[in-house]
Amino acid sequence: MNKKTILNILIILIIGIGLISASSAYVGTGFEHQIPFTKYSKLKNNNILNKYNNTTCKAEAHGICTKVVDGDTIYVKGVGKIRFVGVNTPERGVNGYKTSKDFVKKLCLNKKVRLDIDNKSKTDRYGRKLAVVIVGDKKIGYKNLNEILLKENLAEIMFIPPSEFNPYTWAPDSSIIQSLGKTATKNALTSYVSNNGKSVSGKFVASLNSDKFHKPTCRWAKKISSSNKISFNNRNDAIKNGYQPCKVCNP
């Protein structure tokens, strides 16, 4: 082969690799939504924040938000790059990306925000600080923006233990049902949320972080933390939702 032929082959390969890369662009979990930003663009921030209760989260750091990367990542002056803990918004190129990003811009950009850092996992694998982002002021009150994103359906739950925070207690049942890979029964989820992560009753129990279900008296069932425990009223519900019977207690 002459040099010209080799050069042409290399160009074709480079173009091909570029096309493949473009077609397989990173989309995260694939979460998307169809909410237009026009829903919020004409609203004052107070109109949005007044719908929500004051947060019980405590500010451990604060600073001016200098940049919004996307709906779940911001920069805070003097603190660094912040990843909203417990939630996930659409990635660039996915439906809903711009709305979620612009919503966070509206509430955060060039404003003072407060941060409750996740004390159990202070950073993610990319070195970003994990935190609840707190917006608002003394007059309107201080609100959990992570929770607001979930309740506005601008984000999905992304619970990665260990974590100080349990995003399942922030979200409506519909978000929880959508977010669970192994969707638990409606009754179990309602009980789970109403108890804010405390123990729930049922004939069988399982963990959100496992694929086994147990009798409540099983030694493994007793090891499940209350923040991760869900219940099923019958054996078939557990199996139907992707759980397997424990080999110790044989439920």
Image (tube, rainbow, N blue to C red):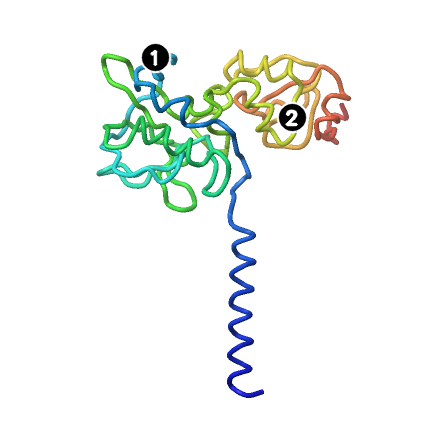
Q: Position of residue 70 (x, y in %)?
A: 39, 38
Amino acid at the residue labelled 2: Thr
Circle 1 sits on which residue?
A: 50
Please determine whether, in this image, residue 98 is positioned above or below residue 221: below
If the image is split into quadrants, where does the C terminus sit?
top right
Image side of residue 121 versus residue 81, left or right: right
Q: Position of residue 82 (x, y in %)?
A: 34, 37
Check if mark 2's residue and mark 1's residue have beta carbons within 8 Å.
no
Residue 156, disc: none
Image side of residue 110 versus residue 183, left or right: left
Residue displayed at 37% across by 45% down: 127
Please determine whether, in this image, residue 112 is positioned above or below residue 30: above
Q: Residues within 10 Å of mark 2 (few under 14, many from 20)?
A: some
Instruction: Report, in whole angstroms, how far the alpha carbon at label 2 lies from the one at label 1.
Output: 32 Å
If the image is split into quadrants, where does the N terminus sit?
bottom right
Circle 2 sits on which residue?
A: 183
Image side of residue 87 versus residue 64, left or right: right
Q: Quadrant of residue 135?
A: top left
Image side of residue 83 versus residue 79, left or right: right
Out of 144 and 242, give the one closest to the viewer: 144
Please determine whether, in this image, residue 51 is positioned above or below residue 219: above
Badge 2 or badge 1: first in the primary sequence = 1
Residue displayed at 47% across by 40% down: 91
Please determine whether, in this image, residue 172 is positioned above or below residue 220: above
Give the label, 2 or 1, closer to the camera.
1
Q: Position of residue 161 (x, y in %)?
A: 49, 33
Out of 156 and 184, give the one closest to the viewer: 156
Residue displayed at 31% across by 28% down: 106
